[in-house]
Image (tube, rainbow, N blue to C red):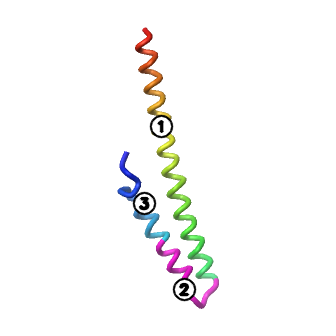
């Protein structure tokens, strides 16, 4: 598995978060600030959730392989 910082998902999330922070920091329109904050939060949260799901599935697969190898050694 690639390190998280080298994935396209990370880059897309980073661009979304930076864009959200820029929008949130603009003065003048309250809706733009709220949408920017929401965009930054959603991008960060979705990246974190997606990455945890991938790592969890990888860990489950590795555990299944180890269990199968242990059963094969018993026979």
- Please provide percent x and percent y for residue 71: 46, 16
Name the N-terminal-most of marks 2 and 1: 2
Disc 2/disc 1 C-alpha distance (Å): 42 Å
- Please provide percent x and percent y for residue 69: 41, 20
The residue carrying pointer 1 sits among few (fewer than 14), some (14 to 19) or many (20 or more) residues within 10 Å by Cα, namely: few
Disc 3/disc 2 C-alpha distance (Å): 24 Å
Residue sitting at x 56%, y 60%: 45
Q: Nearer the viewer, residue 5 or 36?
A: 5
The residue carrying pointer 3 sits among few (fewer than 14), some (14 to 19) or many (20 or more) residues within 10 Å by Cα, namely: some
Q: Say which residue label 3 marks.
A: 10
- Please provide percent x and percent y for residue 30: 64, 84
Which image quarter holds the C terminus? top left
Disc 2 on helix, strand or loop? Answer: loop
Answer above or below: position of 69 versus 44. above
Which image quarter holds the N terminus? top left
Determine the residue located farthest toward the top in the rendered image: 75
Which mark, by number, is residue 70?
none
Q: Which residues are magenta?
A: 18-30
Badge 2 vs badge 1, beta-carbon distance below 8 Å: no
Residue sitting at x 54%, y 86%: 26
Q: Say which residue label 1 marks.
A: 59
Q: Nearer the viewer, residue 42 or 71?
A: 71
Magenta stretch: includes residue 20: yes
Magenta stretch: includes residue 26: yes
Residue sitting at x 53%, y 80%: 23
Answer above or below: position of 14 versus 48. below
Disc 1 on helix, strand or loop? Answer: helix
Answer above or below: position of 15 versus 46. below
Determine the residue located farthest toward the bottom in the rendered image: 28
Q: Say which residue label 2 marks.
A: 26
Disc 3 on helix, strand or loop? Answer: helix
Residue sitting at x 50%, y 80%: 22
């Amino acid at each position: 598995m690639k390190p998280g910082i080298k994935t396209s998902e990370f880059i897309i999330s980073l661009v979304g978060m930076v864009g959200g922070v820029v929008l949130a920091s603009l003065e003048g329109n309250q809706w733009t600030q709220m949408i920017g904050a929401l965009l930054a939060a959603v991008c960060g949260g979705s990246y974190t959730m997606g990455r945890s799901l991938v790592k969890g599935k990888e860990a489950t697969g590795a555990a299944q392989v180890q269990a199968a190898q242990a059963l094969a050694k018993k026979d």
